[in-house]
Amino acid sequence: MIFYKTSEEVELIRQSSLLVSKTLATVAGYIKPGITTAELDTIAEEYIRDHGAVPGFKGYSGFPATLCTSVNEAVVHGLPGKRALQDGDILSIDCGVIKEGFYGDSAYTFAIGEVAPDILDLLKVTKEALYLGIEQARVGKRIGDIGYAIQHYAEKEHPYSIVRSLVGHGLGRNLHEEPEVPNFGRQGNGVKIREGLVIAIEPMINMGKKEVINSPDGWTVVTLDNLPSAHYEHTIAIGNKEADILSSFEFIEESVKKNIEIEEIIAKK
Ligand code: MG
Ligand code: MG
């Protein structure tokens, strides 16, 4: 059953989603070679609790951390730990919070230091695919239109692969609600999109083949061919026209920019 949201509920989900965005922006300020994913997780948890919310993933299905931190060939659900980031890595961070009973959910893939141009292209295309999917999320369209747009861009216009076994989802009082929102599909197929629908769209795009496997830690999903994977996610609400993007990459990208400027000043000294 799909729970369509009232405008008051959408505003609460917006507050939760913006808190996720600001958490990711705060974490982004610390991302550099040498920092561990566990350190980033602590920063995120403190920020969320300081802002009157609770980490949305911690304890969810037994997940032990605030962030999912997935490095390089890790697709999603990476466990924060002692691994220190290295120059040239990419790091996908997925974060959720619950505030006033409602979830927000968003993810962003970061480049650590100097990243190879072909990997930067994967990041760019994955983010663009997300926005192409969001463009399709409007009244009168169907869920399959979202997946089709994302898949076509990644697999037909670019040589990448869409992960099939992990999908986007409805959310609200629960982190995962109906409907499922696959990043692949056929035009005109699936649930009709109507006002009040709140979904997380989250393309996971692999540089190589689409197959993924679970790693021995029991959580981290990695590409079978060990090639990099990128992940971007927004929580959106369907209004009477185009989608209302409830999370935001603006704070994150400001923070990344500031970080690069600081690094350049240090490098010049
Ligand atoms: Mg997420
Ligand atoms: Mg999600």
Image (spheres, grey):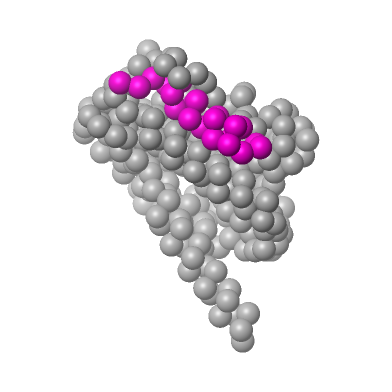
- On the image, the x and y values in percent for residue 135 come to 38, 35
Quadrant containing the N terminus in the rendered view = top left
The picture places residue 60, in percent across and down from the top left corner, at: 53, 31
133 vs 27, nearest the viewer? 133
Can you name the residue that lies furthest to the front here? 157
Q: Residue at x 50, y 62 (%)?
A: 256
What span is colored magenta in the figure? 140-160
Q: How many marks?
A: 0
Residue 2 visible in the snapshot: no
The answer to which image quadrant residue 156 occupies is top right
> What type of secondary structure mainly makes up the magenta span?
helix
Q: Point out residue 8 in the picture as x, y percentages from the top left corner.
A: 21, 33
Residue under the image location 74 percent in, 41 percent down: 227
In front: 206, or 215?
Answer: 206
Taking the magenta stretch, the answer to whether it contains residue 15 is: no
Which part of the image, by quadrant, shows the C terminus? bottom right
Residue 223 visible in the current orientation: yes
Rendered residue at 51%/32% (across/down): 150
150 part of magenta stretch: yes
Residue at figure coordinates x 67%, y 63% from the top left: 114
Q: In terms of depth relative to the viewer, which is nearer, 79 or 234?
A: 234
Q: Is residue 138 left or right of residue 167?
A: left
Residue 111 in the image: state x and y as whole percent: 61, 56
